[in-house]
Amino acid sequence: MAASLRDTPPGLFDLFRKTVSSLIRSEDVLSTPTMANIQALLILSMSGDCHGTQTGSLMSFAWTRTGTAIRMAQDLNLHRAEISKEGTETRRRVWATCVVVDRWYSAAFGYPQMIDLTDCDVRLPTPQDKVIGYLNALTRLSILLGEVLKAIYSPTGLFSVTDSMLHDILSRLDHWKVHLPEDLTFKGPESGPAAGLLHTLYTCVCMIFWRVFMRISFICPPHLQFALNVAEWNRVIENSRSAIQWFEKHDIYWDSWFATSYSLVSCALCQYHTWSRRKDPAAVETLRLLRDAIKRWESSAPVDEHIGRAKTGEILSLLYEVTQSPQRNDAPHVLGPTAGVRERPGNVFDTLTFRQDSESGGAYITSDPKVVDQLKELPQGLIITEPNTPSGSVGLEDGMRKSVDAGAQRGGPSRNGSIGGGQERSNSTDSTSAVQNSYFQQSTQPLAATSLGLEGVPGNMFDWGEPLSAHYAG
């Protein structure tokens, strides 16, 4: 992996890549389950570019080789508690790395997770120092990522997940963030590598979690009352901005683990969306910082030897370049929602203008009272009627679902367990039928293959058999 750094002489990384591929074949690495082979394959999984030079095949090679490492680890019973008394901590660390890689590959590629944690009873590595403390925290975050993928993005996820399950995942994400050790807590752009990377990855997980609930044009299955409020979405925006600001000062980490670049894409998309919907100049400046960091890598690295990383950099740079060009509104708006999600029919959103508010987070303003009636199942106060409101000046703001009564969502349970008032609950009850009718009217056609879920398969997750707080003491 040292050869993947930007200051490596041209040709050296390619030479090492060919050498590794030759050794894998000659030593039959993929058929020999040893701890050394597992560790080697896990190290190679850090970058898809280690596995080939063609974008269409290198990630496939990375996926299959990483899967082989996980199967080897299971063959050695690394997922079981203390089967062997020798090298206990090493076994724990290697298995924790398997879990981390499995979750982030599934998120990035949209493939099923290989590891079912209900089959595992091994403990997390003991956080004896900062490095292992980082691995411990990263593993727990990756477990939560796996839960998000299962609950929301599997083909049947949104049909079977409940409001309480979503609130539980969200509360544990908050718990993970709040209870990080001091040396792993993010404190701004000057934070150290471990804290900055964890913050970037955490922001990506939050973005993945909220993505389905971002658009008021989306209709989730009618049994779900869960929704995103404005303040929560503003927090995601700020976290993605601070993550990019940190990366701009620590761009050397672009050169290593693929999950870093994957998470930065999520952060960049959040900022791009903020510019697109709010015309926020701070979002443009944030995207420029990221573009400049990518340009620095391109100017000092043998880009043709890192095709996968270069393609990701092109995407990030393009997001900034688009902000410098006039927007076109005549192109058809085609979305491919997650399985279980439908787009709300009609063009009622053309008359909406988002107005930010420091206290509540913001609301949509319209001059057409009919719009409020058409969207009556949304939280009370999210759509406000004002005369002479210019239509579409900011456009449809994703993620702007204002909560009612200290966070109650569409009359359902809030983050803190409170319930909306009687009038709100009555409106929500009446509107649920309307949502169901609209939803099921659009659900009569079979799902196309491309509209199925992106990641994972249905199932439950395991909490390692211990309270989360057990590993944060000291």
Image (cartoon, grey):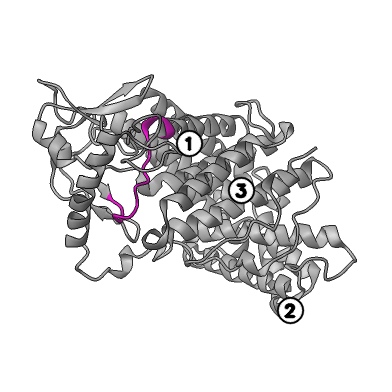
Report whether residue 11 is seen. yes
The correct choice, above or below, for 157 with respect to 468 in the image is: below
> Which residues, given as a range, are shown in magenta?
219-232
Q: Which residue is mark 2?
A: 26
Q: Of 51 and 145, which appears nearest the observer? A: 145
Q: Of 44 and 390, which appears nearest the observer? A: 390
Q: Of 31 and 362, which appears nearest the observer? A: 362
Q: Which residue is mark 3?
A: 141
Q: Residue furthest right?
A: 86
Residue at 24% from the left image edge and 36% from the top image edge: 396
Crowd tier of the residue under label 1, counting other residues whose Cα lies within 10 Å: few below 14, some 14–19, many 20 or above: few
The correct choice, above or below, for 223 with respect to 293 in the image is: below
Residue at 62% from the left image edge and 35% from the top image edge: 178
Magenta segment, prevailing SS (helix, strand or loop): loop
Which corner quadrant of the image does residue 29 belong to?
A: bottom right
Q: Which residue is mark 1?
A: 416
Residue type, mark 1 in image: Asn
Q: Which secondary structure, mark 3?
A: helix
Q: Residue furthest front?
A: 422
Residue 380, x across and y down, in percent = 25, 33
The correct choice, above or below, for 297 with respect to 366 in the image is: below
Q: Which secondary structure, mark 1?
A: loop
Residue type, mark 3 in image: Leu
Q: Of 49 and 91, which appears nearest the observer? A: 91
Residue 66, x across and y down, in percent = 63, 67
Residue type, mark 2 in image: Ser
Does residue 163 appear left or right of residue 197 in this picture? left
Q: Earlier in the sequence, mark 2 or mark 3?
A: 2
